[in-house]
Image: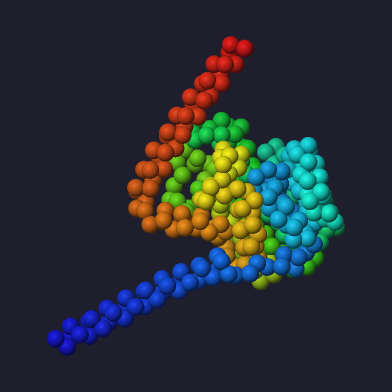
């Protein structure tokens, strides 16, 4: 009987400790999500560089940074859109200096990217880099069906560009000030949220690379005052996601960017800034891996079929023009 009492006490203690750990995690999440103040981003420097800054999340982030008094280097491939974005920012946020850089990451090698970016930022007090530019398939496809040019473009934009832009910027941060913040925009397709992402294999693999690059660089450069972070958005109402109407779980780029900005500079190597996304991810992680894999495969096979039908209709219409 005495042994049974000891066992019950030990079991109760273990249960209490585990429950306390979960409660502390919940309280920590509530603090970080709703009450933790954002950093003064100007402490890093007076300039911020944003890639993929003419649409979606990148454009919204540029406006948020400008609202906080940061001068901007906008990098994108379309000079007309860059000029339009520059004019919009100058109109809304007078007094902000904006510099534009035209680079088509899908057609540039790494060293060329580093050279161009390095020359453009050489004399700037650049404190923040946001690697937002990204590329994906127009719709789900099996690995062998991905066009070689599309495959090469996805790898160049998502991996090569992020790597070499970061390399160009981090050198300046180390040499000039030993301070900076680097944000790499990841994806829910990486292993941080799901165990697989079939029919978007190359895209998901490139985003897993971005997550690992960020986590490893965070450990390397934290001692030098450089905060490196990978921010994970799930679905956002952008052209790339082919979603027009925002909702609670699918925010507009503007809503998402406000959450994103508040996380910059904090010591979270991998994070989901928009709190409904973190709830979604928590639920997803509770699902059995094999079940989730089957659901994703079935969903994306259906998406592939719809994409093929759309391509077929477009091809049919063109043949009759």
- Tell me: residue 142, above or below residue 76: above
Q: Position of residue 26 (x, y in %)?
A: 46, 69
Identify the residue at horizontal 42%, vertical 34% (top origin): 301
The residue positioned farthest toward the top in the image shown: 320
Q: Position of residue 300 (x, y in %)?
A: 44, 37
Identify the residue at horizontal 60%, vertical 53% (top origin): 256
Front residue of this view, candidates 185 and 35: 35
Identify the residue at horizontal 80%, vertical 65% (top origin): 176
Q: Position of residue 130 (x, y in %)?
A: 68, 54
Q: Can you say which quadrant of the picture contains the N terminus?
A: bottom left
- Tell me: residue 79, above or below residue 13: above
Specify whether residue 175 is in view.
Answer: no
Q: Can you say which quadrant of the picture contains the C terminus?
A: top right
Quick check: 289 left or right of 255? left
Front residue of this view, candidates 74 and 29: 29
Specify whether residue 149 is in view.
Answer: yes
Look at the image and name its color scheme.
Answer: rainbow
Front residue of this view, candidates 301 and 31: 31
Q: How many marks?
A: 0
- Tell me: residue 291, above or below residue 230: above
Q: In which quadrant of the rendered view does residue 12 lie?
A: bottom left
Identify the residue at horizontal 56%, vertical 45% (top origin): 246
Q: In which quadrant of the rendered view does residue 6 lie?
A: bottom left
């Amino acid at each position: 009987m005495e042994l049974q009492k000891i066992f019950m006490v030990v079991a109760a203690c273990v249960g209490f400790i585990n429950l306390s750990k979960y409660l502390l995690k919940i309280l920590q999440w509530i603090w970080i999500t709703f009450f933790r103040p954002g950093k003064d981003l100007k402490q890093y420097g007076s300039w911020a560089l944003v890639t993929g800054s003419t649409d979606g999340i990148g454009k919204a982030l540029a406006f948020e940074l400008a609202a906080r008094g940061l001068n901007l280097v906008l990098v994108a491939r379309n000079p007309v859109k860059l000029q339009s974005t520059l004019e919009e920012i100058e109109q809304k946020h007078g007094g902000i200096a904006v510099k534009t850089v035209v680079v088509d990451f899908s057609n540039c090698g790494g060293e060329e990217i580093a050279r161009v970016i390095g020359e453009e930022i050489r004399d700037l007090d650049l404190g923040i880099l946001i690697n937002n530019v990204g590329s994906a398939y127009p719709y789900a496809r099996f690995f062998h069906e991905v066009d070689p040019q599309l495959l090469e473009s996805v790898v160049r934009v998502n991996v090569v560009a992020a790597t070499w832009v970061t390399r160009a910027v981090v050198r300046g941060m180390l040499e000039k000030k030993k301070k900076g913040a680097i944000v790499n925009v990841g994806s829910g397709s990486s292993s941080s949220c799901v165990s697989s992402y079939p029919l978007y294999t190359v895209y998901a693999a490139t985003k897993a690379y971005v997550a690992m690059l960020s986590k490893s660089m965070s450990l390397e450069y934290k001692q030098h005052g450089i905060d490196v972070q990978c921010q994970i958005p799930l679905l956002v109402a952008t052209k790339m996601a082919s979603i027009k109407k925002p909702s609670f779980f699918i925010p507009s780029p503007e809503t998402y960017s406000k959450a994103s900005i508040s996380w910059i500079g904090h010591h979270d190597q991998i994070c989901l800034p928009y709190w409904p996304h973190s709830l979604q991810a928590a639920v997803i992680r509770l699902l059995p891996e094999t079940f989730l894999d089957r659901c994703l495969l079935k969903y994306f096979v259906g998406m592939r079929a719809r994409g093929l039908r759309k391509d077929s209709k477009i091809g049919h219409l063109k043949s009759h023009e």
